[in-house]
Amino acid sequence: MYWCTNTVVMDDTPLILFRLDPRSGVAPYRQIVDQVRHAVSLGRLHPGDQLPSVREVVGQIPINPNTVHRAYRDLEQAGLVAGRPGVGTFIVDTASSAATPEHLKELSAELRQWIDKARASGLDEDSISALIDTTMNAGPDIFSATH
């Protein structure tokens, strides 16, 4: 599941609305960091875009302000955002995804087909996520017989 949703910017509407999944086992600050990273790599957040203030995030989701500060600090240390005192936190000019929106749409459609096939094979969401994570982080011979 992906908990980041974007909205059209009108007035002070945030570009990103955070969602927390308490069942994920992932720390809340890490979920925020990951959602910002995903939004940037998918081209949903761009250099110069402002993240919601800590107060706005606390208003969106039940979270301690210190947790949001920690997430923003981690993002800043990673060079993904820059804080401007009294102004806010902004996405910096980073190398984002080289894929075009059209290519991302095509890849998303192919991934949806694969997910449908995995579900038809009897895999649940947790098993699908585990298979994706394992495959992304392992070599090509991950399922070869070793014993």
Image (cartoon, rainbow, N blue to C red):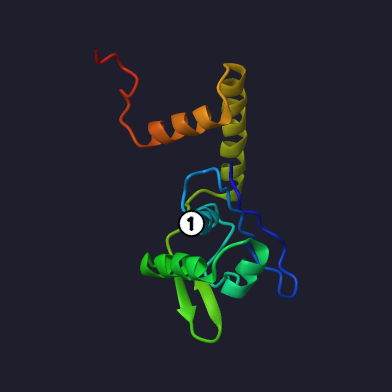
Q: Quadrant of residue 14?
A: bottom right
**Location of residue 5 with respect to 105 vertically, above or below:** below
Is disc 1 surrounded by few (<14), some (14 to 19) or many (20+) residues within 10 Å? some
**Location of residue 41 with respect to 140 vertically, above or below:** below
- Does residue 39 show up? yes
Out of 24 and 92, give the one closest to the viewer: 24
- Residue 55 lies, in percent from the top left, at 61, 74
- The residue at 48%/53% (across/down) is 97
How many labels sit on residues? 1
Considering every residue shown, the one lying at the far left of the view is 147
For the C terminus, the image quarter is top left
- The residue at 53%/31% (across/down) is 126
- Residue 72 lies, in percent from the top left, at 47, 68
- Residue 33 lies, in percent from the top left, at 48, 59
For the N terminus, the image quarter is top right
- Which element type, helix, strand or loop, lies under badge 1? helix
Out of 10 and 65, give the one closest to the viewer: 65
- Residue 62 lies, in percent from the top left, at 62, 61
- The residue at 34%/20% (across/down) is 143
Q: In which quarter of the image is residue 113?
A: top right
Determine which residue is flagged by label 1.
37
Q: In which quarter of the image is residue 115?
A: top right
Out of 87 and 94, give the one closest to the viewer: 87
